[in-house]
Image (cartoon, grey):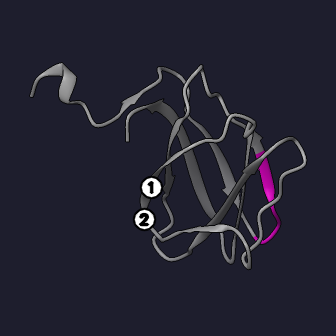
Amino acid sequence: MMSGDNLFTPKPAGTVNIVATGSSARILLNRLACRQLRIKNISAADVAFVNFGDVTVTAATTTGMPIGAGETVGITLAEDWTYAAAVTGGTSTVYFTPGNGL
């Protein structure tokens, strides 16, 4: 594969994670001048719900974006989204990796 064909190039040392439980938790995203983000829910059983915004952002199982058990998704962040929040019905680690491409 040629280097120009890369679907996603992660930023070095940019990944952060949240241990999601029944209470919403948030983390500052290490955006490193990029707008794309890969999100990985490592739980084998629990759906994680995520939301994005500023330092006050929260996530809820009724309004957050669902990330299925074991699922990885890619999104483009809005300019003012600097934090991520996650919540789940059980316990899961949710990883957020900034990069270029989806």
Kindly identify which residue carries mark 2: 70
Whether 20 is drawn above or below 95: the answer is below
Graded by Cα atoms within 10 Å as few (under 14), some (14 to 19) or many (20 or more), the crowding at tag 1 reads: some
The residue that appears at 50% across and 77% down in the rendered structure is: 45
Q: Is residue 68 left or right of residue 78?
A: left
Q: Position of residue 51 (x, y in %)?
A: 71, 57
The magenta stretch spans which residues? 22-26
The C terminus - image quarter: top left
| 70, 99: nearer the viewer | 99
Residue furthest right as drawn: 56
Per the image, label 1 sits on a secondary structure element best described as: strand
Kindly identify which residue carries mark 1: 73
Q: Position of residue 96 (x, y in %)?
A: 56, 43
Indicate which disc residue 59 carries. none
Distance Cα–Cα, label 1 vs label 2: 10 Å
Residue furthest front as drawn: 79
Report the amino acid beneath label 1: Val
